[in-house]
Image: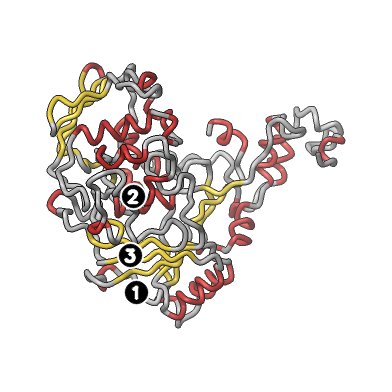
Amino acid sequence: MALAVTALGATIAVAAGSASKSSNAQSQVSAGGTLTVGWEASFGFTDGFDPTGEYLGDAWGIFSNLLTRSLMGTNHVAGAAGNKLVGDLASSVKVSNGGKRYTFRLKAVKFAPPVNRQVTSQDVKYALQRLADPKNGGQYAFYYTVIKGWAAGAKGKNISGIRTPTKNSIVFDLTAPTGDFLYRLAMPATAPIPPEVGKCFNHKPQAYGRNVISTGPYMIEGSDKVDASSCGAVKPAIGFDGQTKMVLVRNPNYSAKTDSKKSRENFPDKFQFIVNANADDILNKVEAGDYDTETSSIPAQVLRKYATSSDLKKYFHQNSGDRTWYLTMNFTQAPFDDVHVRKAMNWVMDKAGLVQAWGGPTIGKVANHIIPDPLLNNQLAEFTPYKTAGDHGNVAKAKAAMKGSKYDTAKNGTCSAKECTTCS
């Protein structure tokens, strides 16, 4: 990311919108019914929906909103307010030993069927032990190497820096103070896994994805019919085939008293995620009312139609997205190995034109740096190192930036060397 901050200035932040036949106004939302989602991608994701190794944002959204609860979480609201850390499984946290010890107490939360028992601190530790072992497919275990004894966990041994003094308390000892440790404990791989089911899928990456035992407000349809009496008896619930559909229904063991409305409001009784590889067909079905919403690539012309049509505008809802789209420059290739050239590119780029070509205001706004502002609580909102009038670029400033570059052979503020005109 440090490299990206230096090199990438032609950035646009994109917040995709979805057009639905159901009004998204909060005042008109009521509990009940089924939300049907047209889903363009497969459910293969990056690790077959196994929370230990799953590293795709779409999957994380399903985990953190609907299926799993980790020690910490955030309020699911737009903007910087959505960065507020809140206890999810944790009822309290105490930081001591100079920022190197974290002690949590757990709320009374139960696993969904077929497990049907209270979550304990051992279930949280088991999830992290599973993540530490690379044979289980974990893709972001490096965030937790700061925990004492993590290297032993990578060899299948006990992680000494995670202790469970009681069923309702867990202690983490770190090798050094880690300011964002609580955020790391909000990631889905740290959500508790019941060992009696999890052990059935040890060293079988992707296999647990169809057998996820929920702690959240919803569970995979048919989980209550699964036999978890032994590993040989465990079969995937009917609601998720891993390829064409994922159907979630309410978890009967979920207690809203252990949660907050800002974190999860849980209006629908049922979610149907239907895989459809044809984005045009998805959008047609949304317009026809066959799907309520979608997760797909929406063409710019469709966004404009819903944003400007008097008949369709009321069905258009924009969800904010903390992501940045950008153009890349390869530092290893001339002329981008020269900082003067990279700065000049940032100055000359018509970023407003890029946004318009991508879909206009409905798709997002110009980003002035690589990190979306809400992620740092808007502390960098005024940081605009390459700001130009109307975000259309500035040739004069680009030429000034080029001066001093070894590729400005004509000494006129342009990239005039042969490397500037050839493609590798």
Label 3 is placed on what type of residue?
Phe
Q: What residue type is labelled 1?
A: Ser
Whether residue 99 is visible: no
Viewer-proximal residue among 280 and 198:
198
Residue designated by label 2: 211
Distance from disc 2 to disc 1, alpha carbons, whole Å, reads 34 Å
Q: Which mark is residue 23?
A: 1
Q: Is residue 348 visible?
A: yes
Residue 21, placed above or below residue 45: below
Q: Name the residue under label 3.
A: 271
Q: Which of 139 and 387 is in front in this view?
A: 139
Q: Position of residue 288 (x, y in %)?
A: 45, 81
Please give the name of the residue rendered at 35% of the width and 33% of the height, measured from the top-left corner: 130
Q: Residue at x 30, y 22 (%)?
A: 159
Question: Tag 2, which secondary structure?
Answer: helix
Mark 2 is on which residue type? Asn
Q: Which of 200 and 270 is in front in this view?
A: 200
Q: Which percent across, then down, holds residue 70?
A: 27, 41
In this rendering, the count of numbered labels is 3
C-alpha span from label 2 to label 3: 17 Å
- Secondary structure, mark 3, is strand
Upstream in the sequence, badge 2 or badge 1?
A: 1
